[in-house]
Image (tube, rainbow, N blue to C red):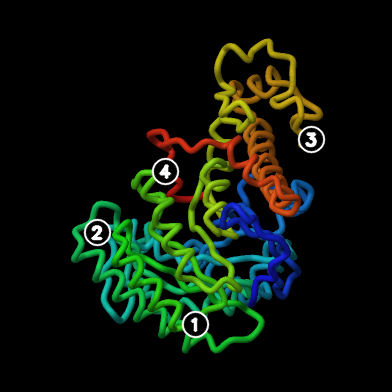
Amino acid sequence: MNLDLLATCPHTRARRGRVWTAHGPVDTPTFMPVGTQATVKGITPPDLTELGAQIILGNVYHLLLRPGADVLREAGGLHEFMGWHGPILTDSGGFQVLSLSKLRTITDEGAEFRSHLDGDTYLFTPESVVEFQRLLGSDIAMVLDEPAPHGSPREQVAEAVRRSVVWAARSREAHGGGSQALFGITQGGTDEALREASTRATVDIGFDGYALGGLSVGESTEEMMRVIELTDSLVPTDRPRYLMGVGHPEEIVHAVARGVDLFDCVLPTRLGRNGTAYTRAGRLNMRNAQYGTAFVPLEPTCRCYACRHHTRAYLRHLLKTNEMLGARLLTYHNLFFYQTVMREIRAAIADGSFPQLLEQWPLQEAAEGDSPGGEG
């Protein structure tokens, strides 16, 4: 898998491109809605097409636990099972296994863990994770990696980097190529020497694309951007770069300026389910009393279904009465908002106005409780 470069920004590292997959092309930079459990929560596949999503994300950890390999094999893979026939990227589940803390043991062989659902024991190895993603039939598979928790001692981060590189080499050998792309993942936290070592070793193994893992876990925005800049300088220009789990729109715009092509994050769906809407003026908590008689759209210029047909007052009413339509409409709006931002980014790179767009999205530190870890 290569990235066809269609345009670049002469003043930044931003790139406009296209990635070709077995289920169709993906225009980059792009945002992937998170479909952890074989669904983008509250959103149908036709909704995804309508709001402009070209590729979505699934998760090996959750799909292996439920519905399991046997069901997905009988269904004919993940695309058939969920009724989405566009491209899918599947995450290897390393972050989820790490978050189990006392329920897992990690060695060079792999990650052994007990299910948070029923206590059954599983062993993730680089080979088994690749095999399961083959069964899923995803267009882009991710290697098994070990992200070190933010704030870990340097020795622990270095060991996670070493193990992740070993696992990456085993994943590459087990995968064997074909129409399914395989991405490597760099680790190293915010330690520049470890991040550089991880990136160089991962690039030496050779993958179809490269992901930046272990970010948006508590480091400052400045630290995150510094790591992205470092990685950009080390990764081949003809390969897609994927920033895992990030993030807020302004973070995405500034990461694009540093050469990133692919993004995913649970925030637009999670916040939508909990009553928060993204707008050009910032985020709105639609449960607030001030919206009770606000008979205007969420965003007057937005062309999503929620903004074309409903008012802030109606959306607040749905949320206050716990009607599921409220969460669904806000989720739809938030995803539409993200896809609109991505379309604007691509257009700005193509027409040379990206530096002006960048100025419209000043960076700011994430608010407490905005960590994107967990399900969508």
| Residue 345 on image: x %, y % | 67, 48
In three-dimensional space, the C-alpha distance between marks 2 and 1, rounded to whole angstroms, equals 34 Å
Residue at 70% across / 45% down in the picture? 353
> Counting residues from the N terminus, which is met first, the one under dot 4 or under dot 3?
3
Q: Nearer the viewer, mark 3 or mark 2?
A: 3
Marks 4, 1: nearer the viewer: 1
| Closer to us: 24 or 84 | 24
Tag nearer the camera, 2 or 1:
1
Between disc 3 and disc 1, whose residue precedes? 1
Q: How far is mark 4 from mark 3, CA to CA? A: 28 Å
- Dot 1 amino acid type: Gly
Q: Gap in Å between the C-alphas at discs 3 and 1?
A: 42 Å
Question: Distance from label 4 to label 2 (Cα)?
Answer: 21 Å
- Label 3 sits on residue: 303
Please, what secondary structure does the residue beneath circle 3 have?
Answer: loop
Residue at image mark 2: 102
Q: Which amino acid does label 2 sit on?
A: Lys
Q: Which amino acid does label 3 sit on?
A: Arg
Mark 1, residue position:
206
Q: Which residue is drawn at 21% across and 65% down?
A: 156
Q: Which residue does the image show at 64% across and 68% down from the upper left? A: 78
Q: Where is residue 372 in the image (x, y as percent from the top left)?
A: 45, 46
Q: Earlier in the sequence, mark 4 or mark 1?
A: 1
